[in-house]
Amino acid sequence: MTSTTRIDVARDARDALPDTDYSDAFRTPSPALFTAEEWARAAFEPVPGQTFPAQQRVWRGVLQLRFGPAASPDHVAGWAIVENDPGRLVLAALSWHLDARLLFEAGPEAGQVTSLVRFRNPAGRAIWSAVGPLHRHAVPGILDAARKRLLSR
């Protein structure tokens, strides 16, 4: 059984969103090498014929993140791509109360996602205090599902 583990957030990950108020990182082992973009798309984009996953409801409804077109090559599930190298992909979204970045990293033995949040006002902190525990519970499963999806191709 493969398990996703929580890891410390590296300083260079925090460079994706200066003055970060919240950060976490999760890693899952993988026997095959995939790009960071492949990890992100496998984690967030729907399987053909299915609707977007439940996290879209949280991102759009609760966090009120503003997204670009979901089917754009410049976006992953609506998140804007702000940096894209084979080993590192940075996605960005914002709302009136917080800024968010997702940093996907890919290596020969694992895939990793780091979440970075900066609060724009007290509402951002309050909303994240409710969403944060759900986020920390959901991300390992999302990353494991992405690994399985990538390995089944």
Image (cartoon, helix red, strand yellow):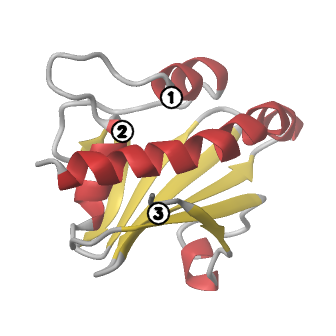
Q: Amino acid at mark 1?
A: Gln
Q: Which mark is residue 55?
A: 1
Which badge, 2 or 3, is on the more N-terminal residue?
Answer: 2
Numbered tag placed on residue 103 in the rendering? 3
* C-alpha span from label 1 to label 2: 8 Å
Q: Secondary structure at mark 1?
A: helix
**Earlier residue among tags 1 and 2:** 2
Residue drawn at x 64%, y 28% as measured from the top left: 63
Residue 131 as seen in the image, left or right of residue 36: right
Q: CA distance from mark 2 to mark 3?
A: 13 Å
In the rendered image, which quarter is residue 75 located in?
top left
Seen at 49% across and 55% down, the residue is 102
> Which residue corresponds to the image point at 51% horizontal and 43% vertical from the top-left?
141
Camera-side residue of 59 and 152: 152
Label 2 vs label 3, nearer the camera: 2
Q: Is residue 134 left or right of residue 25?
A: right
Left or right of 54? Residue 72 is left
Nearer to us of marks 3 and 1 is: 1
Q: Which residue is mark 2?
A: 44
Q: Is residue 134 above or below residue 48?
A: below
Q: Is residue 18 left or right of residue 151?
A: right
